[in-house]
Image: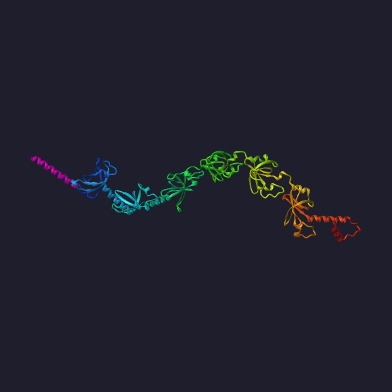
Amino acid sequence: MSEELEVEKKDTEMQSLLQEEYLKSLDGIEDGQLVTGTVVQVNNEYVFVDVGYKSEGRIPVEEFEETPAIGDSVVVLIVNKEGKGGQLIISKKKADIQARSQELRQAAEDKTPVEGKFVKVIKGGYEVDLGSDFSGFCPLSKADIVRTENPESLIGVSDYFIIEKFHTANKLKSVVSRRDYLEKKIKENKEAFFSQVKIGDVVEGVVKSFTSFGAFIDLGGFDGLLHLNDMSWGHVSRPRDYVKKGEKVQLRLINIDPETKKINLSLKHMQEDPWVTFEDNFKVGDVVTAPVTKMTTFGVFIEIAPGIEGLAHISELSWTKRINNPKEVLNLGDVVQCKILGYDLDKKRVSLGIKQLESNPWDTIAERYPVGTQLTRPVVKVTNSGAFINLEEGIDGFLHVDDVSWTKKIKSISSFCKEGDMIDVVVTRVEPENRRIRLGVKQMANNPWQTLRASHPKFSIITGTVSNVTDFGVFVKVDGDIEGLISKFNLCAPEEEYTDEVLKRFKVGDEVTAMVMDVIPQQQKLSLSIREMIKKSQESEVEKYLSNADDDDTVTFADLISSGKEK
């Protein structure tokens, strides 16, 4: 019995000794102290950590985001170095909270960015998780550098924040700003960009937005412009055909202005300029089969090679068709044959023709329609000055209003013909170089003016009918349906003074005889005179009287007057 007591006594002494030895090992640490320990054992419930000083504590597995491995270093907080039963109590979670608290406080003082996550939309802004049970309030206006249209869109987004006001309480008394961080970062990125890059460098960015003249590329919070003309060596009409919104792209820097902060980028300069080798592949006169890539009112663009588009002007689409818009004969995407008419490498332009692949009907127009050819053809268009007469498909001749009649004054061609009428015409002039054909109707008959001039030279007598009486004279219609004018001062005898009573002697339909004073066929002008006719007649009578008198007879002025009265 005494032996058993002796053994028990020794065990108690040993435990006391071990306890005393253990407590001595803890003399170097204090409650609330952060220490770094080593993981020595891990099971389903606990992680055992050796904190040194021959001391070991255990931490529930749930305090770790990821279960550590044996040998990993872990920062823990000494909660109680003499816990229940003398067991060392340590905490990973409390260590994280204390360490994070120190980090956040220092970050607030230094305005150093800290990581956080938008977790909840609350009145006026967001709740932001700053880690280790610390939360902050981010006002809506400070959540981004642009207006946040949909607050929910930021939930779950992790980023950096600047702490404007820090508080250790669990309530949302800490105020943070993501906008301050973004503005600071953008400023740093922009300064670095302008100080480091040079023209010709390749930069990377994200397609941010589109405009009618190109696309804006986000280069890190600041934008560069990818202009429409810099997307492709060829013609570009839609920026969205070359880049997509949100797409990450590599572009070449072609211009940078540190003063205005303008940045110009190029997608086409990422490839060799196809115009450099143009003359190696093409020459004037080449026929190319290629697609129509753009249509305008003045012509169509045809991509004859990747990055090289030529223009087929509307005038080069057909020899004969009157085309008002290329859409009348072509569609976008049509594959056509065209001929290279010319090019300008400096201006990067190519002129193309489609009609040149067909024979030009105007080259032989004079052979098909020589001057003098009489035709019966339809009127296709009436204008103020004349009418267009269709000769064959795509070729019209023009009948001027002055070429309808030799004698009639036609003020409007519509009084002679209208669209759709079939009329007889004769070819009067052919101009292949100007693509013009003049037609006439009056030329199908002899010119009565020429006939009149031949049959009634100046000073001859002609008889006609009064067709109109005006304030300035009398119009007389003679043979050939030609009208001549007797001015009012030529209506009476030389010895008679003109008065309005003279004009009243003449009525429409009266027969009148007068002297021809002038015939001008080119101007369709016939001038007549009664005065001159009487004057010439009187002179003739005087000459006749004188010639009949004897040489010995003396003729006085009174005799002439008397003779004239008798006549």
Magenta-tinted stretch: 1-25
| Membership of 100 in magenta stretch | no
Give the residue displayed 70% in from the left and 47% down from the top: 405
Residue 435 position, x and y percent, is 64, 44
Q: Residue furthest right?
A: 552
Residue 475 visible in the shown view: no
Residue 152 visible in the shown view: yes
Residue 487 position, x and y percent, is 75, 56
- The answer to whether residue 271 is left or right of residue 285 is left
Residue 324 position, x and y percent, is 58, 45
Taking depth in this image into account, of 493 and 291 the one nearest to the observer is 493
Residue 60 position, x and y percent, is 25, 44
Query: What is the number of callouts on the image?
Result: 0
- The colour scheme of the drawn protein is rainbow
* Quarter of the figure with the C terminus: bottom right
Give the residue displayed 23% in from the left and 48% down from the top: 78
The image quadrant of residue 335 is top right
- The answer to whether residue 433 is left or right of residue 127 is right
| Membership of 14 in magenta stretch | yes
- The answer to whether residue 298 is left or right of residue 433 is left
Taking depth in this image into account, of 340 and 500 the one nearest to the observer is 500
Q: Residue furthest left?
A: 2
* Quarter of the figure with the N terminus: top left
Taking depth in this image into account, of 490 and 282 the one nearest to the observer is 490
**What kind of secondary structure does the magenta stretch mostly adopt?**
helix
